[in-house]
Amino acid sequence: MRIVCPFCGERELGEFTYLGDAKPVRPAAGASEDEVFDYVYLRDNVAGETSEYWYHGGGCRTWLKIARNTLTHEISSVEPAAGAGAAKVGA
Amino acid sequence: MAGGQTNRLDSGGLIDRSAPLNFRFDGKTFSGFQGDTLASALIANGVKLVGRSFKYHRPRGILTAGSEEPNALVELRTGARREPNTKATTAELYEGLEAASQNRWPSLRHDVMSVNQLFAPIFVAGFYYKTFMWPAKFWEAVYEPAIRRAAGLGRAAGVADPDHYDKAWAHCDVLVAGSGPAGLAAALAAGRSGARVILCEEDFSPGGRLLSDGGTIEGLPAAEWLSRTLAELATLPDVRIMTRTTLFGVYDGGTYGAIERVNDHLPSPPEHQVRQRLWRIVARRCVVAAGAIERPIVFAGNDTPSVMMASAMRTYVARYAATPAKRIALFTNNEDGWRTVEIALGAGLQIAAVIDARPDVSPAHRSLASKGGFPVLHGSVSGVDGGKDGVKKIAVSLTGGARAEVEADGLAVSGGWNPAVGLTSYHRGRPKWLDDIAAFVPDGAPPGMVAVGAANGAFGLGACLAQGFAAGSAAAHDAGHSGKAGTAPVADDEAFSLTPLWHVAGKGKAFVDYQHDVTASDIELAQREGFESVEHLKRYTTLGMATDQGKTSNVAGLAIMAAVSGRSIPETGTTIYRPPYVPVAIGAFAGHHRDETFHATRLTPSHHWAAEQGAVFVDTGLWKRAQWYPRAGEKDWLESVTREVSAVRGGVGFCDVSTLGKIDVHGADAGAFLDRVYINTFSNLAVGKARYGLMLREDGMVYDDGTTSRLAEDHYFLTTTTAKAGLVMQHLEFCRQVLFPELDVQLTSVSDQWAQFSIAGPKTRDLLKEIVDPAEDLSNEGFPFMGAREVRLRGGIKARLFRISFSGEMAFEISVPARFGDAMARNLMLAGAPFGVTPYGTEALGVMRVEKGHIAGPELSGTTTAADLGLGKMMSTKKDFIGRVMAGREALVAPDRQVVVGIKPVDKARRLRSGAHIIPKGQTPGPGNDQGYVTSVCFSPTSDQWIGLGLVERGRERMGEIVHAHDPLRGEDYDVELCNPVFYDPDGGRQRG
Amino acid sequence: MAEFSWVSRSPLEHALAPGAHGARGVEAGVSLTEIRNFDLIQVMARRGKAAELARVANGRFGVATPNAPTVVQAQDATLIWSGPDQFFVLSKGGKHTMDTLAPALSGPASLSDQSHARALVRISGARARTMLAKLSSIDLHPSAFPIGAAAATSIDHTSVTLWRGGDRPDGQAVFNLLVFSTFAGSLWHTMLDAAAEYGVTIAHSEELA
């Protein structure tokens, strides 16, 4: 498998580490235990398009959000995490 | 005829008669020529019997001339290099080659185990599941060992492989599998277009069937076209032809696996060279020109030596000038089989008869028969009379019912051709059935791949060239190259004209899978017993599960299943194709990564100094760390470690702790960031101060711990445990980039920048004063406990000094740039000599941390909470942090959790062992009353007994209680006392003094 | 008071044996030279300040900083891309150290000294690419990895920085490899194993280019 890192270009799988589902969003401080439980534990087992976090730890150390089809392994998009590099986020 | 090579033609072939080679097979010496395979050389020497079959120990000969060979498997080489199940048909001959037949005892000709044939009824399909089911314990003790002795293939060497293997990457625009006419045409078109091309050929000579079948291309003899084409390809700088290289798999994203047999054709690899190399090839496009495999027809006695595939028969004659037989019969159901007759006649061999299963034979072949003086019999071979010396007589059932007999010493068989659909099917592709060639052809392929020529069901030479050229040109174009490819080479297409025939009914065993001894009747039995699905058929009969993966047998097996189950072949379907296409040595997958280079190794900055001191090293993760420093006269490790501990507690010692992960945390929001990743607060830490921090996972369990110092308003220096250094960096980057992207934080690993030493013991300050610039104030006031700042050392270099203690002693950690780490160790020895400075290793470090009740890896087990570790009060209630909410779950704050507590044996002389279970006193050990376990132990010189830490239910409330330590692994049971985990200096006066 | 000195020792000092290694009787196909005693500073833009860093750094170095996997040669430094909005400053002789760079760049950037955290190996020779193909999954064909190309990548599962410098006078390509110091000895042996069959010339140097 090969992933096109938005910064480094196409690289082999061994440079990347898979984390998991990129859909759950960390609840804000003050969230209930149930909300945090969902965030920590509950995942869909998708046959088809998924959104995943991968870490290019063997390269530029950027966290990537990857759209991948679990049936074909086809990767349709790779985006850097919001806070990759020095990107300004928020106000 | 060359000396002893009774079956070698005087001229012709692609062997080098000026380069004779001696070799041994089953202890007997033979000779062959450069350019031979072991199989062709054996044939040239008149050897017909080369092995015994898997289950029935039937005598077997050579069936094919390629990597699909099921029969002619040998043990190649001797001693540590002995390699079982090597195909004689692909093993290149070299001077001194030694090979032995397999699966026979005491000898190939007189094999005791051939009595298995008498018990054939119990070896039928599924015999594993039926015959030996009862009594159950007989399976392991009796049946399986007996079967394994009787049925089997070659023997592994049993000792370490002395050769080296490596792995390499290659990149190209167009990858071509196979160098037959289609592959060469593809490479030519792609190469001329300007593409980077890699052409893999498993044979040692490029050319594919051109080497055996000849033909005319562009009006030139095939051999001449081949040499011209290879010459042109050699002029193209970005075309690389890799012979002896099998493309064995296709993986996601256009990555392909190939195995190159770099030096298998030599007795042993030249010095500094590898035996085999595993290639990972990244290609934009792949043209599969892997050809087709001729398939047998299943009839009684079809496994008799010198029954051979028709194409293989003519390969031995034409390419190797070796004659498998003198008087050959051909059994064919297609026009292509007749080529063997043409080539055999051309070589002066006799044709006994052609048995053609088709209703009609072409006029050209009819006239060939009359000129050659041999009969053409319309019908099928129904039996073979012969044995280990080969075929003698062939029984023929003529169309219409009459019978005939043919005397011959060899039988060439052609049941048609199966395109090599492996590579195109490895992404769960299912090939489709093509009626006119009665074979499966690729139905699509993994992205970027296309099959051409025979691999695509186009068997004619003209079609191969045209398809290959067009695909090569298109692939280059797709990869962005638009140079002029010119026009495709032209040749005529030969007639194929096949009438399907799979199985001829008859008396005697008719083999489908030669290597696993699966017969037609096994398949019929499987069907009767309900194993009709091809996946069931495969597993029940083991059809296609041998090392050849059923290359010659699968389709015939399906066809027979289709016939007996009343379905069509496409309805019956194929099993799933999986890589590798040929067996690949595990050594090749490992490559460089074996023995001491199994993984990369990290050395601390003072490693070589420690080695000079005679340190004993221990592997911790990738690191080599000094474990202890033995001195002359010390009888064991414990004596050395005890000395080191006492030296620190009584004077001063130092230890290289550079293995800790070290991370620069910069940015305006660095403090706020740390507040979110640690359970305690760092934003209020003063510049010049250090603080111990604990991180949780989001599920509330402890993740890692370490000391973090604030070196400037916007700069913290964070340390991690040795084990988690990389993972914590990854976690922090996730927090920075994904969870809290609004914070201004930058993270840099500086683990390798700093050599860090712990200096500990009451004389630490005395030692440091010798090293540190006299202007620096190291007094308790000038450098209080948990102070952290840059200092200047004598001699001018800068260092970072941290007043932190893991040992419980007055201690500092000092960091210098890593290239000064070696000098630091030497200077500490020099400066500390007056104070008896003692280097100590990880064992003494561990002893002192257990004595002090500090947690480490065994307690940070991923199942412990901060409160379990006695650190619950560190959890801030004033801020959010990772793991905060989940750490509050009911079960994680339950009062009966197992928490860290001290443990010491009641009998002071007893040794405490980690892993021992804690059971209430007076109870019988069992899962129901297991209250925890001992996590860390040491012999404590300070306590003068073995002590430890453990995780024990409500441990902190039970200090003073006597409980039972149960150690079933070591068969030990003894009483221990639960106690304060801080065995040494519980007030902490020493480290603050 | 004890007499002691601060000798700087390269992490490869122990492993590196200058001279010939591997196959003999052939012209060495690979040349491995360790470059010692360099200054290496990691510069990372602070949030939202990538453009400001580029401007300030341009003023300091006289060249545009790399914003893609490339190296940029300044008069007295090599700027090597190391990730988005970050680069290394590689130099010699104290021209660009923490002490001199921090005052200039610490507004828009965070700096970390990595001078001791890496070993630098220069790889060249007729078989350099062949040997590197055993170590690196990167395509080093001249069309894919021209002079000035850089990559943050891995060798032996270990992070490295690889870039192509100017060709040797004889036209051979030159590859530069920054590896972590604590892994250097191990990776050095891996390189020697990969290169041995081609014949290796081993040396060390203090010269950056």
Image: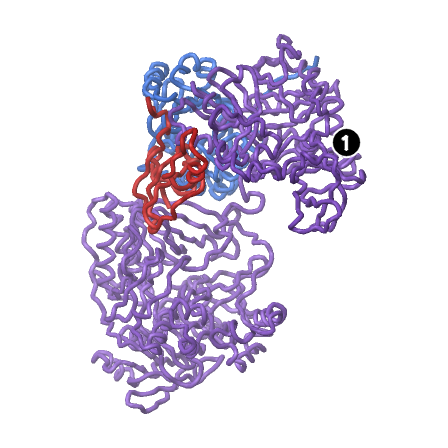
Image coordinates of residue B517 in percent, x first then y, are: 47, 74
Q: How many marks?
A: 1
Chain that appears blue: C
Image coordinates of residue C177 in percent, x first then y, are: 44, 32
Side (left or right) of B806 relative to B268:
right
Which residue is labeled 1 in the image?
Answer: B941
Outermost residue, top direction? B775
Task: Name the foreground residue: C95 vs B829.
Answer: B829
Query: Where, by quadrant of the figure, is residue B521 drawn?
Result: bottom left
- Residue at 43% in and 53% down: B260
Res B945 visible: yes
The quadrant in which the C terminus of chain B is found is top right
Side (left or right) of C175 relative to B986:
left
Image coordinates of residue C103 in percent, x first then y, are: 43, 12
- Residue at 34% in and 40% down: A66
* Chain A colour as displayed: red
User: Mark 1: which secondary structure?
Assistant: loop
Res C141 visible: no
Task: Name the foreground residue: B87 vs B254.
Answer: B254
Query: Where, by quadrant of the figure, is residue B791 drawn?
Result: top right
- Residue at 39% in and 24% down: C87
Kind of residue indicated by mark 1: Pro
Chain that appears purple: B
Q: Chain of mark 1?
A: B
The quadrant in which the N terminus of chain B is found is bottom left
